[in-house]
Image (spheres, rainbow, N blue to C red):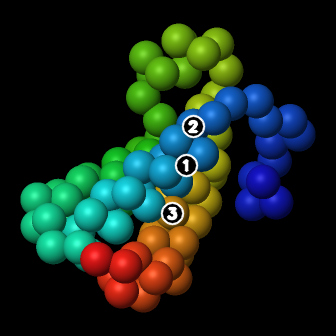
Amino acid sequence: MLYSDVQSYVGLSGTLHGLFAYYALREALQGRSSSWLLVVGVVAKVSWELTMGASQSSMELIGTRVAVEAHLFGVISGIVFALISYPLYKNAR
């Protein structure tokens, strides 16, 4: 969280975004072309949050600011891990 002014962070949203991005890209690289829509969707969602801000309903639900930076780093990490591990599961099929 060096990217933001957040002093403490509690939650799993960054991890969940990372796992979603990882498995969506992994399936897309394995030939499931519909999974590319999921990859584009999660990238578009995080891009929207970074430019327009998180939804008001999400902030009201958790009672604080949504750490969209965690979502960004989660998605980036998921994509990087999927690309790094691609040769491993490509040869395992």
In the rendered image, the vertical position of residue 6 relative to residue 34, given as above or below: above
38 displayed left or right of 82: left
**Of marks 1 and 3, which one's residue comes earlier in the chain?**
1
Q: Residue at x 45, y 72 (%)?
A: 82
Residue lying furthest right in this view? Answer: 7
Image location (x, y in percent) of residue 75: 49, 59
Question: Callout 2 environment at 10 Å: few (<14), some (14 to 19), or many (20+)?
Answer: some
In the rendered image, the vertical position of residue 58 relative to residue 29, given as above or below: above
- Give the amino acid at mark 1: His
Residue 1's disc number: none
Residue for badge 1: 71
**Of marks 3 and 2, which one's residue comes earlier in the chain?**
2
Q: How far, Cα to Cα, is label 2 from label 1?
A: 6 Å
Image location (x, y in percent) of residue 31: 15, 73
**Disc 1, SS:** helix
**Of marks 2 and 1, which one's residue comes earlier in the chain?**
2
- Give the amino acid at mark 3: Gly
Q: How far, Cα to Cα, is label 3 from label 2?
A: 13 Å
Image location (x, y in percent) of residue 40: 25, 61
Q: Nearer the viewer, residue 71 or 20?
A: 20
- Give the amino acid at mark 2: Ser
Question: Callout 1 environment at 10 Å: few (<14), some (14 to 19), or many (20+)?
Answer: many
Residue for badge 2: 13
